[in-house]
Amino acid sequence: MTVLDFEPIQHADFDQAQLPEEVLRWIAQHNLWNIWVPKAFGGQQLTLSQGLQVQKELARFDGSLGWTQTLCSGANFFIGNLQKEVITETFGTYGNRICLGGSGMPTGEAQKEGDHYRITGNWKYATGAPHLTHFTLNARVVENGKAVLSADGKEVVQSFLLSRNQVKLIRDWNTMGLKATASHSFKVEDILVHQSHSFIYNETYLPQPIFKIPFPIFTDLTLWVNYLGMAQHFLQEAKSTGLQLDFSRLEGVLMAADSAIDQFASEVEATLEKGGSFSKEFTSEVHEAGASSVRHLTSCLIALYPKLGMRACSTSQPLNKIFRDYFTATQHINFL
């Protein structure tokens, strides 16, 4: 597993409109977009526990850094859902700079035309948009002007991988926190995509155990660890004020979250090792635990913030930035 040396980016400005160039170079140097990607395709092939530890460390250093790495490496995780020729075409070209990202909301249409789809629509919040090499998106499938329905009568939604030149950015990310994630919207206008560039979350083609993890569990744990890292950073900065405050509640919630994430990751890895499957009950347990943990973290930060003085109010201070980053992150739909 990569040992991270933060010294080269110690003084980078993460409160600007996107990640600084020196940070992007540092990410590529450590191959952080590809922590889940198999070594055969140039990745680190980390275990779930190893990857979560890296993401917590990144989020604890800076919210925008952790959030961007998590969302983009999470999109690179879709390598497990892609067909071999598309993997070779995509991951063989960009090396450590390959960076996927996009939106899981089905806010566009994919008109089926033989073995192609004609895609049109707008999608919000593509984390890392300015430096993505490829975009992923979900779209409702339409054929002959009508929505395609599944056997249970629901609209069929398909996922797609598009290259950057097939997408137009809408630079509308203007938030109080996570500024450097540059999570702009994007649009696709009448682009024809071969069916080989479509995929389904729970259909995998690579043999590595990591790709057997249900995507909801993977999403919950990777996002949860970001909230944990940011809250740990908040506690560190709050203590540095020298104010005689009671931090015990936050410390307890942080310890419980850290332990729960480690335990869930261990259970997932044990199940994978035994070749077992994941029940709906376990999936729900992970999600409910994550949602509850984030609610408690949020409550602790809100309770402490008014007691932290002017340092917490100054936009030039780390404490203020961490607070803004954390509460921007809480607006992600996953744990709302």
Image (spheres, rainbow, N blue to C red):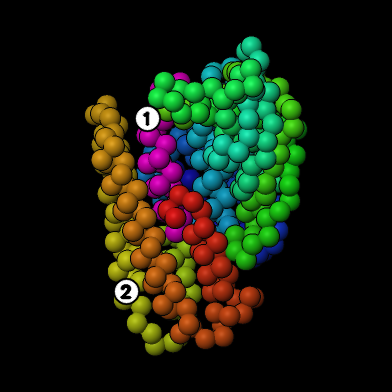
Q: Earlier in the sequence, mark 1 or mark 2?
A: 1
Which range of residues does the magenta coloring cover? 203-227
Using the image, determine if residue 223 lies above or below residue 159: below
Q: Residue at x 43, y 72 (%)?
A: 301
* 87 horizontally vs 211: left or right: right
Q: Is residue 133 visible?
A: no
Q: Residue at x 47, y 63 (%)?
A: 230
Magenta span: helix, strand or loop, mainly? helix
Cβ atoms under marks 1 and 2 closer than 8 Å? no
Mark sitting on residue 84: none
* 32 horizontally vs 293: left or right: right
Residue highlighted by disc 2 = 249
Q: Is residue 200 visible?
A: yes
Mark 2, other Cα within 10 Å: few <14 / some 14–19 / many ≥20: few
The amino acid type of the residue labelled 2 equals Arg
Secondary structure of residue under mark 2: helix
Give the x, y percent position of residue 200: 49, 26
Q: Place residue 255 in its image quadrant.
A: bottom left
Using the image, determine if residue 40 lies above or below residue 255: above
Give the x, y percent position of residue 133: 68, 36
Q: Place residue 244 in its image quadrant.
A: bottom left
The amino acid type of the residue labelled 1 equals Lys
Using the image, determine if residue 47 lies above or below residue 9: above
Residue highlighted by disc 1 = 212
Q: Place residue 92 in its image quadrant.
A: top right
